[in-house]
Image (spheres, rainbow, N blue to C red):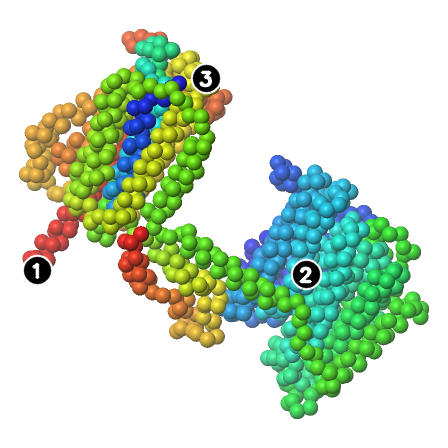
Amino acid sequence: MTPNLTYIVVVGVLFAAGVTLLLERSLTRVLMGVILLGNGANLLLLTGGRAGGPPIVGTTDGAEMSDPLPQAMVLTAIVITLGMTAFLLALSYRSWHLNGHDEVQDDVEDRRIMDLADRDEGPGTDDADQPDSDDQLDGDGRPDPDSRRPSAASLAAAAGGRGREA
Amino acid sequence: MLVLVAVHALAAVVAPGLVRRFGRRALYAVALAPAATLVWALTRTGGVRAGEPVVETWPWVPRIGLELALRMGTLSWLMVVLVGGVGALVLAYSARYFRSDDPGLGRFAAVFVAFAGSMLGLVVSDDLLLLYVFWELTTVFSYLLIGYDPAKRASRRAAMQALLVTTLGGLAMLAGFVMLGQHAGSYRWSVVATDLPGGGYLVTALMLILLGALSKSAIVPFSFWLPGAMAAPTPVSAYLHAAAMVKAGVFLVALLGPAVADVTAWRVVLLVTGLATLFLGAWVALRQTDLKLLLAYGTVSQLGLLMVVLGAGTRDAALAGAAMVLAHALFKATLFLVVGIVDHTTGTRDLRELSGLGRRAPVLAGVAVLAAASMAGLPPMAGFVAKEAAFEAFQHGGTADLLVLAGVVAGSALTVAYTLRFLWGAFAGKPGVAPTEPHPAGRSFLAAPALLAVAGLAVGVAAPALDGLLAPYADGFASAEPGYHLALWHGLTPALGLSALAVAVGGGLFLLLHGGRLRATRWTPVDGAAGYERLVAGVDRLAVELTGATQRGSLPFYLGIILVVLVVLPGGALLTGGPWPREFRAWDTPLQAVVAALVIVAAVMAARALRRLTAMILVGVAGYGTALMFVLHGAPDLALTQFLVETVTIVMFVLVLRRLPVKFSARPIRRSRRGRIALGVAVGAVVSGMAWVASSGRLATPISERFPDEAVSYGGGKNVVNVTLVDIRAWDTMGEIAVLVVAATGVASLIFRRSRDLDRRSAVPGPRPATTGGPRWLTAGFEAHRHSVILQVVTRLLFHAIVLFSVYLLFSGHNAPGGGFAAGLVAGLALAVRYLAGGRRELNAAAPVDAGAVLGAGLFLAVGTGVVAMPLGGEFLQSAVLDLHLPLLGKVHFVSSVFFDVGVYLIVVGLVLDILRSLGAEMDRQQEDAHDDVRDKELV
């Protein structure tokens, strides 16, 4: 089978546009990138089989029939893209509802670990970081686990401030 | 034997409940499990004495040849007696040691007896993998026992240290086991021992196994974890760190010894590390002021001695070693229990604070002296018998043996010295220290150590009987020595002289140290603990650096990495892989190029669009263009589905975009945008290249050549794509509809904010109707002021026609374009039109069902169709074809896979309904609530 130049160009352009959108931070854009990528991938799959008449026995001769196998794969892929689209749309709405925008933020915990790495420190999850029952007790006699951890709010602020740069 | 292990497991399960109910007295009941073990082992004494092992085999995982192969030979019998006997006594002792209101007591009882069960399993395992499983179980339970008090930092640290060190060794040991097992083709030690590999392979395997044994038994350089583990309650120390767990390594060495002792490396490693441990432990013990730590270092030292004796590889040494295992367990457990009582009754175990306890607690002191005599190797105790045998065993060899003998004698002298230090520290009156006033210790508290100490005496006296019991193990060693026999009195032998020498030197050393004329200096050539700390800290730092370097927490960063790899690796392969196909065709029909140009323009513009709506429309155009490409390709099913999906997608976008801002947020800096475009273009180029190569790379005859015939003959349908979906590749479809259900659930849970709101998936309530009474067909009902009346009425007229058409598509799909996916989308669009025309009331009227129920029914039907085929003798999802002649209807062609397709249909309808309820109706409601709130505030 010889390559079909038209397909190859379309697939390339759909992937290029899709990836460009995918790398954005706006979830709506990411979603559109996913849709374009999906279309590109579906066409890429189709290039694996020959074109021809509809693969319906009785309508088309066996020899002129288009390859049905990639079509079956693509068909389910199309519907899954629909489910994916719905999910991402719900996600962007939710994000907008909570934060007033639909941008993907950096992960706060990851940011915390990167700060530790910058300071050349260990994870501090070992006992060394935890207060002992002997030296620090709160009211009901249990050690206070949160006393040495930085507050979540300050971390979120730090992450939010740096999140946009990347 | 398996039954006994099960009894322990059962006891562990019921123990917390018993403790809650009966307090600490419940421990006596729990002690019955190890006691039963002891009794059972004693009843098997006769057979073991005759050298006949007890064997049990139960199938477990046949595929990897793993069976519950249990085997109790002489050595195992000895260990079972110790594990059961000491275990029962220590549990009974614990019933007086702990207080009933101790919050951790229930857990302690459970974990302790579970540990005893694992230890029992370990020593009777014949299968090496099974042994490994029990080995790790003891590690885990000992972790829990050492960390008895989770609020103490020291106990957490010690538990973690013991866990890491012994697990590390255990993993190495597993590798060694696998090496041996793979070579022999069996993991049963009784088989493996007869078929050992040779050369470096065997040495490597043995060294790995030794790593496990030495770390478990706290031999240098792994010895540091054992003193740390003294953070555990004293009964735990008495059991785990005297009788049971630390003996696991010794047991393994003894078990493997008869078969592998002629390997030089095995003997050298054991002798060298054992002697080093013997000296180091004893020396450090002389510096301790805490009685328990003194005993702990003494244990380390004794374990070293055991390794030396059992690693020597001669019959007499092995006999001495087996006797020593028994003697050590008896006296060391006793002494730990004594320390526990001292601690309990006086509140301290610091030998600088204790004074004159021997006068005030004479029975306790007597018990301690008895056990200490055994430890120091004085007649007529068990320790003496064992030590004599060891001296004797090393007398007859060459220079190396004599060197070892000198080491063992010197070690014995040190042992005598720290034994005296222990007795003096615990019981002697000291000038300048106020006499200690102990609380009285009850008789039952003293019973366990007293019994153990007397047992040590009895074993010593009955040495000839012990000799008969242990001889079958020692005879397993190849070297046919004359055959030494355990006894108290051999006459005036050199060994007796060495014993006397050791006692004399040890006594002198104690006096020198005690008188202050000699100081036990800090002397640690091998500091395992510092190495451990450095290693752990290093791993922690490495983890932080690696995580910090790779987990940047930024989605574009992750995607960028993945895509760059895609460009570099497959792209590089494409560039270097040549030769590329040179022939190509521009298009199948020129129309393709026209449509392709449309798609390209739409995609590029969509990537540049600033407004959400513009971008959405352009993406839609690209999608419809793709559908046209499908048409031109000869794929009507795809085209139909793609058209429908694009339409549903546009509906969804409109529903959500009405809530989002018109424009995308401000674009980030230009440089990163250029980077994104560059990466996009690169990925596009690579994928194009892949398409180019791949589409000419299909050389073999496609499997789908046979699909048309199979579709008709097996699938009973003419539409090959549809038959592929519901029959030939139905498993794939099954997975994909499952994904759809998950996606629908995800959408609903993102939009419905509280789980009780999810009830509204059946119907999101609309504004109250203006008129009472239900709506009638073709009347503009609710919210007439907001929606076009004409549109509402027209959609109601059309609705049923569209649904009917969808059903037609569903059933004709087997033979013509259509099928469950397309039909479901059509029905979904009908619902969408109703919703768009009349709001959520209208949607509820059109589909008065729960979207989740529709999804569930679809999945149930699809799976059910597949399952039904199985009892009928077919495979999962196999279709049956039925041709019937019915009156009136004529010939009916019926294929069972149509039910599967109905399931798919229902799931797609459910998905769309779910989307409409979530992104449509519920979002409307939330919006209205928000408006109401604002209005209420304004009114106030």
Q: Amino acid at mark 1?
A: Val
User: Residue B785, relative to residue A97: is it above or below?
Assistant: above
Q: Nearer the viewer, mark 3 or mark 2?
A: 3
Q: Do badges 1 and 3 share one subunit?
A: yes
Q: Residues within 10 Å of mark 2 (few under 14, many from 20)?
A: many
Q: Residue at position x 37%, y 46% from top?
A: B558
Q: Position of residue B282 (x, y in %)?
A: 72, 72
Q: Quadrant of residue B806?
A: top left
Q: Residues within 10 Å of mark 3 (few under 14, many from 20)?
A: few
Q: Position of residue B179 (x, y in %)?
A: 67, 44
On what subunit does the disc labeled 1 rest? B
Label 2 SS: loop
Say which mark, if any, is on residue B622: none
- Distance of label 2 from label 1 (alpha carbons): 78 Å
Q: On the rendered image, what quadrant is the C terminus of chain B found in?
A: bottom left
**Residue that label 2 marks:** B217
Examine the rendering and report whether any part of residue B729 can be seen. no
Label 1 SS: loop
